[in-house]
Image: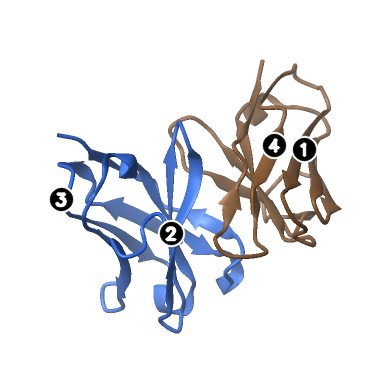
Chain colours: A brown, B blue
Amino acid sequence: IQMTQSPSSVSASVGDRINITCRASQGISRWLAWYQQKPGKAPELLIYSTSTLQSGVPSRFSGSGSGTDFTLTISSLQPEDFATYYCQQGDSMPRTFGQGTKVEV
Amino acid sequence: EEQMVQSGGGLVQPGGSLRISCAASGFTISNIYMNWVRQTPEKGLEWVSVLYSGGSTYYADSVKGRFTISRDISKNTLYLQMNSLREEDTAMYYCARGLNGGVRYFDSWGQGTLVTVSS
């Protein structure tokens, strides 16, 4: 299953609301996760099963969608949110990731 | 505290072998689906292999027949034995734990270990 994210990068400011889209090449029900990665660090799980926040993740992050189209929303961007975000499908093997969306100032 | 500490990366020539390790603490890897995921600037994140709690193993087509995932329960350590290495195997390799003991998502990652395949 191919995962395609858009945009590949987004310029934003603190306080902005941003949306990142992920499209699967075939239906994956709601088996989708989002990860955040900062430079030099491993990815961190933010959201799984489309909309379930991982423990400790701030409520400004939210996810929606089903089937082939999914969205990660950050309601009010904070300085620590500038990072690269990846989607990943958990529907079938092999697990596959989107190419990433870089959120930058 | 639950964590995974990786070791064993480095520079290896094409056709060579390397074994990387992922030592876990704070949880028992034999009860968990454990994975290897690699990352390159060009290809992004790529799932490589999984070791099920029951012992079954699965591999990406790109590494099947060349890589072997295994564990030492007494050391609570996950391994990836990489043989017949190719330049395209050059990547940062991460071990990653299955969320809530499951197989769909990855809730904890090692710090990464760099494998460079070059002559």
Q: Which disc number belongs to residue B21?
A: none
First reached walking from the N terminus: tag 2 or tag 3: 3
Q: Closer to the camera: disc 2 or disc 4?
A: 2
Q: Chain under label 3? A: B
- Label 4 sits on what residue type? Gln
Q: In the displayed structure, would residue B43 be above or below residue B27?
A: above
Say which quadrant the C terminus of chain A sits in.
top right
Mark 3 element type: loop
Distance (Cα) linking label 2 and label 3: 19 Å
Residue at 75% in and 19% down:
A14
Say which quadrant the N terminus of chain A sits in.
bottom right
- Label 3 sits on what residue type? Gly
Q: Mark 3 points at which residue?
A: B16
Q: Are marks 1 and 4 in contact (CB under 8 Å)?
A: yes
Return the x and y of residue A46 as percentages of the image width and height.
Answer: 66, 48
Residue at 61% in and 35% down:
A100
Q: Are marks 4 and 3 in contact (CB under 8 Å)?
A: no
Return the x and y of residue B117 as percentages of the image width and height.
Answer: 23, 40
For residue B106, what is the image quadrant? Answer: bottom right
Return the x and y of residue A70 as percentages of the image width and height.
Answer: 80, 46
Q: Mark 4 points at which residue?
A: A5
Q: Mark 2 points at which residue?
A: B61
Question: Taking B2 as reference, is B66 left or right?
Answer: left
Q: Can residue B79 be seen in this view?
A: no
Q: Closer to the camera: disc 2 or disc 3?
A: 2
Is disc 1 on the same chain as disc 2? no
Return the x and y of residue A18 as percentages of the image width and height.
Answer: 80, 28
Is disc 3 on the same chain as disc 2? yes
Q: Are marks 2 and 4 in contact (CB under 8 Å)?
A: no
Q: Name the residue under label 1.
A: A21
B84 or B98: which is nearer to us? B84
Distance (Cα) linking label 2 and label 4: 23 Å
